[in-house]
Amino acid sequence: MTTTTAQVTRGYRDDVDAGAPTRARWTWLGVGAGVLGIVATMFTSPNVGTDKVGPDALAELSRGQLQLGGALGYVTVALLLVLAASWRAKAVTAARGAVAARVVADGLTASAAALSLGYGWKLALALYLPGGLNENGFNTDGQFVYFMLNDFGPFIGYLGVVVAAGAVAWLGLRDRLVSRWLGLVSLIPPVAVLFMSGALSIAGFPGIVGPIWLIVAFAGLSLGRHPILGTARV
């Protein structure tokens, strides 16, 4: 095991020194997860008037919109899991034991697990609304429970992505394994979520900044030069 790791690490450094590193195409999975996450979370969530906070709000919901959001959300979860596995296989190996590199993969995996529930609740609400396969499975009060779960459910699940952003900030500003600009950009999500949750008690802000960070950060990782990916000198 030790010999294999040493060979991989040595190969990484040889590629860097050769000056002709290959692009890490797998990082585009993060961009795809971010784009789908925005659509599945922000554009397919229940949206009703603020004066309606009871079961009557169910009449304003679009079952098709909820179903689309849940399905796209499941694809987002799959992309996050593959992205986390790719990060472990490629970036963690090259990080020379940097704990922050492992936190990135763990954060992405944690979000995938939480979002499985968040988007699952969206599909469940579509299932029990009029027109769904189980439209008679719950009465209006029961359907309203799923409505409340969808209020912040898919948004809260991106907290793991925000933690991953903080880890990338550490990799950029402390370990110098990603570019400095990416480290600075990656500071924004955790600082913003800390403020919004601590000062304003807003639980779902990770779902606003998380997908956007995925797009910016992994596009930057794809197109830029970063030691952790073997695309820049150490």
Image: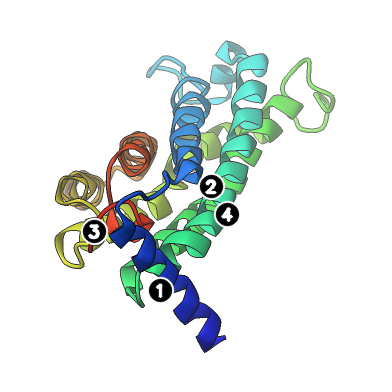
Q: Earlier in the sequence, mark 1 or mark 2?
A: 1
Name the amino acid type tagged 2: Leu
232 on left or right of 199: right
State the residue position of label 3: 233
Crowd tier of the residue under label 1, counting other residues whose Cα lies within 10 Å: few below 14, some 14–19, many 20 or above: few
Residue 16, x across and y down, in percent: 32, 59
12 on left or right of 177: right
Q: CA distance from mark 2 to mark 3?
A: 28 Å
In the rendered image, which quarter is residue 129 located in? top right
Name the amino acid type tagged 4: Ala
210, 214: nearer the viewer: 214
State the residue position of label 2: 80
Q: CA distance from mark 4 to mark 2?
A: 10 Å
Depth check, mark 2 against mark 3: the one in front is 3
State the residue position of label 4: 113
In the rendered image, which quarter is residue 50 located in? top left
Name the amino acid type tagged 3: Arg
- Residue 145 visible to an observer of this rendering: no
Crowd tier of the residue under label 3, counting other residues whose Cα lies within 10 Å: few below 14, some 14–19, many 20 or above: some
Q: CA distance from mark 1 to mark 2?
A: 28 Å
State the residue position of label 1: 10
